[in-house]
Amino acid sequence: MTPFTYNNGSMQAEAVSLQQLAEEHGTPLYVYSRAAFEERWQAFDQAFGEQPHLVCYAVKTNSNIAVLNVLAKIGAGFDIVSQGELERVLRAGGDPKKVVFSGVAKQPAEIKRALEAGIRCFNIESHAELDRIQDVASAMNMIAPISIRVNPDVDAKTHPYISTGLKDNKFGVDINTAPELYQKAADYSHINPIGIDCHIGSQLTEITPFVDALERVLALKEQLGQQGIELHHLDLGGGLGIQYTDETPPAISDYIGALLTKLNDKSIEVIIEPGRAIAGNAGVLLTAVEFLKPTDHKNFAIIDAAMNDLIRPALYQSYQDIVAVTPRSDGTDAEWDLVGPVCETGDFLGKGRSLNLKAGDILAVKSAGAYGFTMASNYNTRPRAAEIMVDGDKAHVIRRRETYDDLIGLETVIAD
Ligand SMILES: Cc1ncc(COP(=O)(O)O)c(C=O)c1O
Ligand SMILES: N[C@@H](CCCC[NH3+])C(=O)O
């Protein structure tokens, strides 16, 4: 489905007018489509057919509890990287038995809380972390189910900041030394090794790196079998890309199909941790044009959304399509740099975009459902935007805009 379409010359989210939402709730404003979230998660789930599997949505992508709740209701599992994310999943009604816990440095208190909640598995990223989990679990007299995140040294061919499966990256354990760590895990009194985990990067637009990584994971599984360590699942991470502009990522069914063909084993459960491929095109960021500032050198359109609202263009030089919500019939296109009010030269959401603009126009930054609000900050003491979830012809405020009290209320002056 395409959740954002034009109808009578103006853009809608499902059956709700974006122009109207911007007028009612102000901008910047994040708008999500419930149906898009559901449909994308279900596409992953259904692509597995008869293969035992669990689709664990990567919470970091878009962690609003309304989003998590919508996914929990259709049976989603969750990939978390902090206790904060675990608390969100639990608040949203997620099943802790479907939660996998990734991340390179889980705190003892986080491990304790996750054990109490009864999560499915800890994805361990180092020797030291295995030791820590053994210590916490043994103090609680509980057994911690674990998998080891291995680094298969596969080039994901994506932006260097979002590539995670190379030897150069901080993530995971060298796949060649993993058997030794599995042995240590198996010998520990309060650890139960149940899986292998790997995640090689994000926004991958080719299937080959995923299949190459799986091939190495399968070789490891075989070797562990010879050591007498039998595993219950393979967690192949997330990373499937989306179309921001002219990328051509594989269809979900082709991606899962290629993995299952390589695996060719229905006796093992496959876990995946997709984020962007579910959330990315399920959301837009609405922003208003404040001023037009044409100069001799270039044209700036100053908009009310900034790098604090959506940091991806500034951080990764990423391209996000930007369109007029109600395109003008008068006037002509010009080239604009779309810049925000934040005091940084890197504060732009798009450069050299051909648009027909006037002050007050509402624009939609597309593909903003993933790593948009979750990476937003209060830089320049700017309140974070409100979030809306559209469901058919209804629009629900799922997070109100922050107030200045929200921002400065935690701080205090020191006494003389
Ligand atoms: C461990 C882990 N799992 C899943 C994801 C989700 O990735 P994506 O949004 O690319 O599917 C990430 C982020 O890259 C991650 O670090
Ligand atoms: N935050 C990144 C993706 C990183 C995924 C986390 N491992 C992005 O916006 O593209």
Image (cartoon, rainbow, N blue to C red):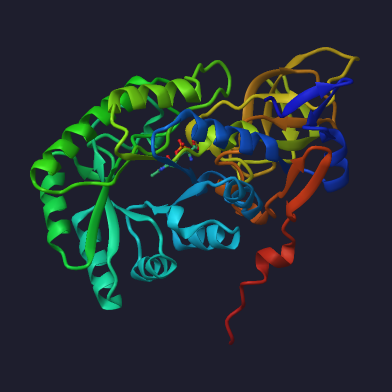
Confirm whether residue 311 shows in the render: yes
Residue 98 percent across, percent down from the top left: 45, 53
Please say if 137 is above or below 2.
Answer: below
Please say if 339 is above or below 389.
Answer: above
**Rendering quarter of residue 27:** top right
Please say if 228 is above or below 411.
Answer: above
**From the image, which quarter does the C terminus lie in?**
bottom right
Residue 2 percent across, percent down from the top left: 69, 25
Residue 64 percent across, percent down from the top left: 62, 52
Q: Which one is nearer the viewer's eye here, 48 or 180?
A: 48
Residue at the bottom extreme of this rendering: 416
Q: Which one is nearer the viewer's eye here, 127 or 191?
A: 191
Point 73% across, 31% down: residue? 364
Instruction: Please tell me how many numbered marks the rendered image carries.
Output: 0
Point 29% across, 35% down: residue? 165
Point 26% across, 51% down: residue? 194
Q: Report the image quarter containing ligand 1.
A: top left
Point 33% across, 22% down: residue? 261
Q: Which one is nearer the viewer's eye here, 164 or 302?
A: 164
Residue 291 percent across, percent down from the top left: 80, 33
Confirm whether residue 376 shows in the render: no
Residue at the top extreme of this rendering: 332
**Rendering quarter of residue 284:** top right
- 156 on left or right of 312: left
**From the image, which quarter does the N terminus lie in?**
top right
**Rendering quarter of residue 320:** top right
